Amino acid sequence: MSESSGFLAAIGRFFHRVGVLLGVRLDRATESDEFNEATVERGIRDSKEKAQNAHYANGQLAANIALLKAQIKRERGEMLEIESALKIAVSQNDEANGCHYAELKANLEQEIADNEEQLKGLSETYEQNTKVIADSIREVQRFQREFEAMKVKVRVGRSLESLSTMI
């Protein structure tokens, strides 16, 4: 009887030591899992912040586009005034003013063309940025949902492990 109780005590101590060892390893794994979880969550926050900063910068680009559109509109108004003045100079055979208004008109036409080209480039950039930002935000949100689902799976797995050790 003492041999069997000694054997059972030795087995009990063995399982106790294995349990302690597994518990220590589980604690270490939990600590590293918590570190990994914190790292991933920080990455998600950083990605969201970068997307917000990009969104803000794209808003600044939209403001510049609006200013450029207003400038083009003003320049077109000036163009109409210059054309009217040029027609008056031509009708009065005023060669000096006619040349001056013709030169102003040519310069303004070139400036309008340059601004319209710049507007086209900025608008294309704005549209591309808007699409990239929206795709990035969707990707971060998708990753965050998947990460949250994985955390739930890990918690369920740990609960099952705890339950199995209790049984």
Image: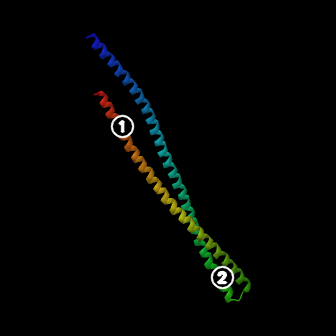
Q: Residue 102, located in which quarter of the rendered image? A: bottom right
Q: Residues within 10 Å of mark 2 (few under 14, many from 20)?
A: some
As drawn, which residue projects farthest toward the right?
96
Nearest to the observer: residue 139 or residue 13? 13
Is the C-beta separation of discs 1 and 2 under 8 Å?
A: no
The residue lying at 67 percent from left, 75 percent from top is 107
The residue lying at 65 percent from left, 85 percent from top is 87
Give the structural element (helix, strand or loop) at label 2.
helix
Q: Residues within 10 Å of mark 1 (few under 14, many from 20)?
A: few
The residue lying at 34 percent from left, 36 percent from top is 157
The disc, 1 or 2, on the residue closer to the chain's N-terminal end is: 2
Task: Identify the image quadrant of the N terminus.
Answer: top left
As drawn, which residue projects farthest toward the top?
2
The residue lying at 37 percent from left, 24 percent from top is 18
Where residue 32 appears, as percent x and y from the top left, is: 45, 34
Q: Which residue is mark 1?
A: 155
Q: Which residue is mark 2?
A: 85
Give the structural element (helix, strand or loop) at label 1.
helix
The answer for how far apart the CA atoms under marks 1 and 2 are is 80 Å
Where residue 27 appears, as percent x and y from the top left, is: 42, 29
